[in-house]
Image (spheres, rainbow, N blue to C red):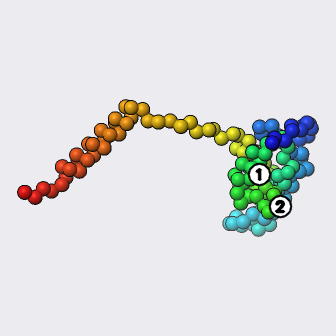
Amino acid sequence: MTNPPDQKPANALELGRGVWIMPDAATVRFVRSSGPGGQAVNKLNTKAELRLPLHTLRNISDAALSRLRRFAGQRLTQNDELLIQAEDSRSQRENRDACFARLRTLVIKAATLPKKRKKTRPGRAARERRLKQKKEQGEKKQRRQWRRE
């Protein structure tokens, strides 16, 4: 069953493929980054943590939502929230933007239907090439054998 398409308000954040959220649905928190970096890392809260409850996603199909849960992996909390972190930059704004970019990538990947595999069989020429190669390989190994007479 697909959720009915909601009317998207003007202030909604577009995540891709028609999926959107309200700006207050996602919470962004800034914490201290880990790893080396000296004074900047020890004093400034530049690492961004984006939390988004999955039930706040609008205009997403049930199948896409289940794919999103599967793709999220360890980024999905027990409360069914998506937790995305970024600490690539020294800037809070750039790290926040990186979080939203990762969220968009994940949503677009989940909303894209996987291609169905078409069953194919090898053609006659391919089968003949394979058999010819097997025959040549067998003859090569036969020539290597040491014969006692």
Label disc, if present, on residue 79 of the rendered structure: 2
Front position in the image: 36 or 56:
56
Q: Amino acid at mark 2?
A: Asn
Given this view, does label 2 or label 1 mark the residue nearer the observer?
A: 2
Residue 128 vs residue 84: left or right?
A: left
Q: Quadrant of residue 50?
A: bottom right
Please state the horizontal and vertical placement of residue 97, each as a whole percent of the image: 78, 48
Residue 141 vs residue 131: left or right?
A: left
Residue 139 vs residue 76: left or right?
A: left
On screen, residue 2 above or below 70? above
Quarter in which the N terminus is drawn = top right
Residue furthest out toward the left: 149
Q: Residue at x 89, y 51 (%)?
A: 25
Please state the horizontal and vertical placement of residue 81, each as a whole percent of the image: 81, 57
Quarter in which the C terminus is drawn = bottom left
Label disc, if present, on residue 99 of the rendered structure: 1
On screen, residue 106 above or below 51? above
CB atoms of marks 2 and 1 within 8 Å: no
Is residue 42 visible to the viewer in this orientation of the structure?
Answer: yes
